[in-house]
Each structure stands twice: as C-alpha cells, then as structure tokens.
Amino acid sequence: MVTMSIPSIGVRNLRVVAYEGTADDRPGTTIQDRGVAASPRGPGGGVGAGEVGNFIITGHRVSHGRPLERVPDLANGTHILITTGGTVYDYVVSQTMTISFRKAAEKAAQNAAVPGRPGVTATQAMLTISTCATPEDNAAGNYWRDALGNPEHRINKIATLVATRSA
C-alpha cells in the first residue's frame, strides 16, 4: 500500500491507488471518487514512488472528502512524504505549474517524465501532485467542464526526492 502525508496542510496517510492510465482519465476519476488519491502508471502516466521520472498523484479538492483541498497552499520547500514497502520517500516542493485540459501541450507537460518538459529524459525522482482549480476557474467566470466534470485548469505542485528512510 502507498500513502501520502503532507503535514503542513493536515494530509495524513492518504491512500494512493496505482492504476494503468493517464492523469484524470475515467479510471483515475473513479478512484478519486472513493475519497483517495490516484496514481497513473504506464506509457501515458508516471512511475512509482522513488523511481526516476514523474510520480503523479491526483485527487479531489472540492468533493469526495476534499483530500487535496489545501494543495494550492503548498509553498516551495514543503515536504511531501510517500510511504510504501517499509520506505518513506521525502519529496520537497520546488514549483507550481498550472495547466489547461483544453491544451494538449499543457497536458503533456503535466504527464512528462520531467514535469513541464515533454521529451526530456528524466535523471531524478520527481513528484507531481495535481488537483483541480475549480474555485479559481469559477471565480474567473470559467465554468467549462470536461466529460468527467473536471474544470479547465489543474494546479500541479512539483517536488523532487531529497531523502529516503525506513518507515
């Protein structure tokens, strides 16, 4: 089992369910609708915790228990702890990337092996935490939704693995 903790915003041991797919597709949304986080894997998704590449975690912000409600508040330097198989992976947030679901190039940037840099070969373990920008879109008068109810924009917090330790 994989869990995520972000002490600074009160996320503790949030279950992360891996699946074959891409960020915010129908299987991932079904997982998120259970109040847990989803982690796409495979050619269109990401890698696992601690692996070189982009470990992607998506979750709801304004529904289904709102597990990632405060993700937009994460500042650079914030620690995100992923626990699996007796190991804790400590990632530190270094940037924010907002993408539009209406722009294929921006979706590709979110899912790239090096977040924000499609086509670049990964050399380090990175993490993308992605959640909706529903309040921001609504405040701007943007009520567009895709077939799964996702708003146009996603807020992504990008982090780099800085340490590992035994759980």
Image (tube, rainbow, N blue to C red):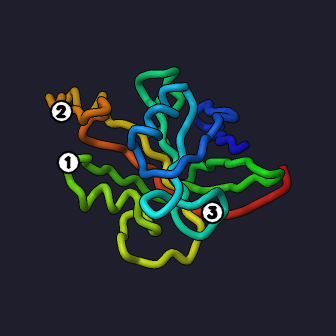
N-term-proximal mark, 2 vs 3: 2
Q: Residue flagged by tag 1: what amino acid is it?
A: Arg
Foreground tag (1 vs 3) = 1
What residue is shown with label 2? 144
N-term-proximal mark, 1 vs 3: 1
Label 3 crowd (10 A; few <14 / some 14-19 / many >=20): many
Q: CA distance from mark 1 to mark 2?
A: 10 Å
Foreground residue among 99 and 148: 148
Q: Is residue 128 above or below residue 134?
A: below
Q: Is residue 1 left or right of residue 166?
A: left
Q: Residue flagged by tag 2: what amino acid is it?
A: Trp
Foreground tag (2 vs 3) = 2
What residue is shown with label 1? 102
SS state under label 2: loop
Residue drawn at x 52%, y 47% as measured from the top left: 57
Residue drawn at x 66%, y 40% as measured from the top left: 5
Res 162 → quadrant: bottom right
Number of on-image labels: 3
Q: Are marks 1 and 2 in contact (CB under 8 Å)?
A: yes
Q: Residue flagged by tag 3: what amino acid is it?
A: Leu
SS state under label 3: strand
Label 1 crowd (10 A; few <14 / some 14-19 / many >=20): some
Residue drawn at x 24%, y 36% as measured from the top left: 146
Q: Is residue 19 above or below residue 50?
A: above
Foreground residue among 163 and 40: 40
- Which of the labelled discs sits on residue 161, or is there none? 3
- Furthest-left residue in view? 141
- Which of the labelled discs sits on residue 81, or is there none? none
> Residue 28, percent across and down?
47, 40
> Residue 89, percent across and down?
70, 56
